[in-house]
Amino acid sequence: MSTKTPYVCRNFVEDVTDYLEGALPDDTVARIEEHLADCPHCREYLKQLRETIAATHALGDQDIDDMPADVKQRIMDAFRRSQA
Amino acid sequence: MDGGLDFNDEAVLVKALTAREPAALAFLIDTYHSSLVRLADQYVPSRSIAEEVVQDTWLAVIEGIDRFEQRATVKTWLYRILLNIARSRGTKERRSIPFALNPSLEPEPAVDPHRFRRYSRRGRGQWKQPPQPWGDPEEHTLATEAHAVIRQAVAELPPDQREVVTMRDVLGWTAAETCNALSITDTNQRVLLHRARAKLRTALEQHYRQGRPS
């Protein structure tokens, strides 16, 4: 019989980032994985968090215009002129 | 190919920049311009101001190149310059991000505490209102919907959380790169990331819940 306080859902939602970041000690990771095996709701929470991260990453896919040619020219000119 | 110089090699890159080799600066611009604009976007109210911030960054890079000491990588140095310019410009534009980034000491639960049981056979803290599946991404055109919801939710984050989640999840930086650029500890970085991601998940959850006939 374990005397540890049980690992519950409310613990998981606070540990999830450290879990994904690999910042937890092995025994905590083991408790989390045991909990996840048992708890479909926390598996769903983890899945949603991963979808959230993917959706956030997709913001970075928006097109950024290349630097306008005249601006680039100005910067390259400044670069050439800058040598001491 | 400029004699085959490999600008991914820091020493080669710095030497070529110091020698005012145009290809070296062109390489930096091609590599970093768009992510600098994306990051600057988080500090100032419009894309056109973000582009000005990035132009000023390049000019500051040129001005500073002879003083660059290879204690940090070129990438870190570049982003630090951008952050300084973007933050002071953001202050001027009244969209400031505090210079000191320490997560507030107020606890911020990732999920509303009322959604967990206070008493249960297996101990308190089990889900009472568990997360409902969002459904097949393809079915509700998740990509485009999520895009708008997330963009809005990121804009509404506290500035320090917005900054960290932009670096980690929008730009895909490592934890070490983010800590380095912001001069914060890994623990604080993780707290800010955790709070930001939890809020973004909640925003998507609320969005999908509204969309579902109950």
Image (cartoon, coloured by chain):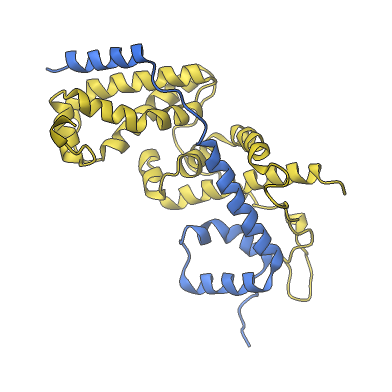
Chain colours: A blue, B yellow
Mark count: 0
Residue at 46% across, 62% down: A22
Residue at 37% across, 45% down: B177
**Relative to residue B107, is residue B69 depicted above or below?**
above
> Quarter of the image containing the C terminus of chain A?
top left
> Percent position (x, y) of residue B206?
74, 44
Front residue of A68 and B208: A68
> Quarter of the image containing the N terminus of chain A?
bottom right
Quadrant of residue B117 within the rendered picture: bottom right
Can residue B105 be seen at all in this image of the molecule?
A: no
Asked if residue B171 lies left or right of residue B126, the reply is left
> Percent position (x, y) of residue A78?
24, 14
> Percent position (x, y) of residue A58?
54, 40
Front residue of B138 and B97: B138
> Percent position (x, y) of residue A63?
49, 29
Quadrant of residue A4 within the rendered picture: bottom right
Quadrant of residue B152 within the rendered picture: top right
Residue at 74% across, 75% down: B122
Farthest-out residue, bottom: A1
Asked if residue B183 lies left or right of residue B127, the reply is left
Can residue B44 be seen at all in this image of the molecule?
A: yes
**Relative to residue A78, is residue B206 depicted above or below?**
below
Asked if residue B2 lies left or right of residue A48, the reply is left
Farthest-out residue, right: B214
